[in-house]
Amino acid sequence: MTLKEPITLAEALAPPVVDYPQDGSVRPVRRHVWEPVETAALPPGAAPGLRGRSIAVVGGREATAAAVAAALTAAGARAHRLAPPAEGQRGGFAEAAAALFAAAGRIDGIVDLNLEEPFDRSGPDGWEAPFRQTVAMLQACFADWITETDAVRLFYLPVTWLGGRMGFGADRVEQPLGGLWAGLAKGLPREVPNCNIRILDLTAEHSAEEIGELVSRELYRWGAFEIGHHGGRRYSLRARHAQPAPPVRALRPGDTVVMSGGGRGIGYALARSLAEEFGARVVVSGRGAVPDAAAVPALAFDEREFRRYRDERLREAVAARRVPQVRGELEKLAQERELWANLVSAREDGLRIDYVQCDITDPAQVARLVDEAGDRLAGVVHNAGVDVPVRLPGKTEQIVSLVVRVKVGGFLNLLRAVADRPPLAFFCSVGSLTGRWGGMVGQLDYGAANEALSRLGLWASQDGEQSGRVRRTPVSTVCWPTWERLGMITNYEATLRYMSAVDVREGLYHWKRELFSGGSGESTFIGDVGPAMLPSVLRGYQQDTGLPGIERLAASRYYLGEPLDFRPYAALTTEHLLTAGELPCCDDFRVGGEPALPVSLCLEYLRAAGDWVLPENGDQLRFAELRDLDVDLAELRVGPGRRTAVLTRHAEGRWAQDGSWRVAVTLEREGRRLAAAELVHRADELPPERAMLPPTGALGAEDVAPPAPGGALGWSGHAFRLAAWQRDAVGGRLYGRAEPGRTADLLLASPAPGSALPLNQLENLLRAAWLAQAPGAGSSSADAGATGATGRVRRLTVERLSVTPSAGEGAVLLVGTPDGRDWTGYHPVELFEPCPVVLRVTGLRHH
């Protein structure tokens, strides 16, 4: 086949038209860049939570470690020193870590000083022994830490030396390999759900005593994962949506691009695109030899033949008791088949995609790979990667070293190989969201390697010695989510629980824009965050960012509170500090004339607890209804002398005989029960319900008067949009039209958290029920308002409450029985048309 004519740059960079699946598994991605932002200073002095803690101080210089230990001791903790590996040490890490753990009796947290010396590009393997030591220390703690349900006790705090602003300021990145420990930290809560983390980034100018003081202040004050200190100010990171610069140069026919990896997965997708659209030559590489179908006939089998061959091999393996070995051989063969098919396809289509065997961790082989490009080398893509997903206890030193060497060593080898060449159009490394946000279970080393790759890219972008020329090669890192069923994916469905995937055509579109923009630094592409969230992970997301889905994350974070005890898939205990001044709705609703927490918001606190105690892989379960609600209305007050309330919430889940998942939730205040309910979750979704509005008789014949101010319960209408109520003069039913509200009117938080329950509609329903049930409500409307205002009420109970997800999306016509106990909410449509039923309440009583 003859080679197609290259297309224009505008054609190559035209955005694709993508038909995204309805299930949300593949979502559009947006490009974000990261920037340091000043954040709130901490209270002076060491954190009170340090008292009585047992803490390991690992790595770093002895003077720094001594100062950190002294600060921890002064705060009431016990410090245990694990000195850095001796020069040339290659083993013994597990034994030393186990001995320290045994001597300490227990380890509550680790302060990891890791690599404190400035980066030495001539000795790039200096990370290996300290990183192995860190992994060994975490492995020594794992058996104890994995069974811990206390959500406060455990922590891991690595100190990095990226300039005090995580490498994103104008500061010099002294030690980019600190990214290894930063990436490791961000993945650790996936392995140990109750491990809190804080990555503390400092400058080379910080003294040992200052480092000790900052460490003691940052511990046990959790929040954002990454915190830096620079010039006396405290920083965190914020994501900002940003388009890349316009293209400055495209590839020309005959230009050559060298790729580490690139024979399979997303690398091959890019290689084929560059060769097909621009007529470029792309040199891809891999550790294995060029696949030879003459020597290995299985390479050329079609899918049916290969399945038959695979099944036969597995049957033989079972008989010979060699199943693990044969599975590994078949996996390797599947990779070789993909590589062979890709190379054959490119050759048949006339594309110049050449394969070169190269171990990217070997500097000499990398030099030969770059030499293969000749004098038309235009760009380099560092795409190679190795992921061996094994949980922390099973991570061997060999696995960890291989995973990191491919990313880190490969980057430095490629950078060194092009140092004496004329400036290239691009030098692009392929990173991952596993580095930015932490990977899945089993990816601690892979996430660490990717975060180090991003930090090395920042270092290389500012390194004046990279090239003696005025115009230097731009060094960039692109951090991807999962690509749709393409790339290094062990379990594609599992990855979707962590993040949505990117469409392959859309990914290539963004990638080519990055290559040709001439930009440097890290670009992160994000679709949507998946449901696999933990309390310790959620607290690390910054709320004031432009991240996709941040409103949903902000709501989850607000209603989460501060975790005290957590058993994944089973139970959660949290604490919530409610200050009336931060809750305008407390001045809107009053109990006995005092500002109080509205019942509807109390219901949302109860409901939100269920999100954290769903069973494993219970994403298909949906909140169906709330049962047996019991609220002590007097405990809702935050009035004079009680302007602040501390609530403790406990939720525990179990399977019921009917197949539903039940969560028992209680809210307590200073040991007194404020509210309790049972949440019901089901997998099966009921079909949408529609019904005709009940006959209204002489609707509007009687207005229902509101209660007089200062009574047992009262609503001012400043935060909640109050409905006008009417009573059907014939049947006695109550009717009111409740408009949707805004949580921004109820809560002083930015961004304002949304709610799953329709708060404004519920609050109006509760108010109408009070009007109907308060003492004297059976008299004339005027008397009902006055008498009802003076009636005393202690408890509110509800037998069942169910809402649809759309209940808060528009006005709801609420219809209640004359006694205010049973209610139905409709989205009103045309008269005499069946209306969607979006809300039902039964058995509502004031006591």
Image (cartoon, rainbow, N blue to C red):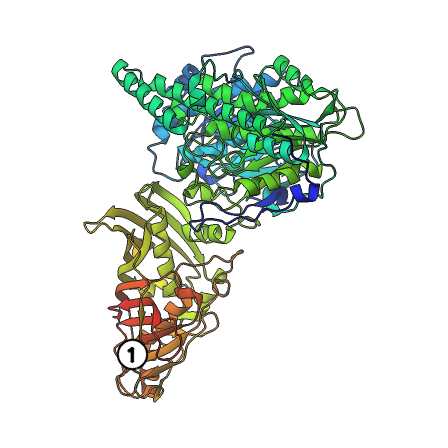
Q: Residue furthest top?
A: 88
Residue name at image x 34 percent, y 86 percent: 699
Q: Position of residue 135 (x, y in %)?
A: 46, 23
Type of amino acid at the residue the image marks with label 1? Pro
Can residue 463 be seen here? The reply is yes
Can you say whether 790 is above or below 51 in the image? below
How many marks do you count on the picture? Answer: 1
**Of helix, strand and loop, which one carries label 1?**
loop
Can residue 766 be seen here? The reply is no
Can you say whether 817 is above or below 48 in the image? below
Q: Is residue 203 left or right of residue 685?
A: right
Residue name at image x 41 percent, y 45 percent: 531
Q: Residue furthest front?
A: 1
Q: Residue furthest right?
A: 470
Which image quarter: residue 643? Answer: bottom left
Instruction: Characterize the local packing of mark 1: few (<14), some (14-19) or many (20 or more) Cα atoms within 10 angstroms.
Output: few
Can you say whether 752 is above or below 545 in the image? below
Q: Position of residue 611 (x, y in %)?
A: 36, 50
Q: Nearer the viewer, residue 695 or 677?
A: 695
From the image, which quarter does the C terminus lie in?
bottom left
Q: Nearer the viewer, residue 34 or 363?
A: 363
Q: Position of residue 282 (x, y in %)?
A: 64, 26
Can you say whether 502 is above or below 184 in the image? below
Q: Residue furthest left?
A: 657
- Residue receiving disc 1: 694
Q: Nearer the viewer, residue 198 or 422?
A: 422
From the image, which quarter does the N terminus lie in?
top right
Q: Position of residue 83 (x, y in %)?
A: 51, 18
Residue name at image x 35 percent, y 72 percent: 835
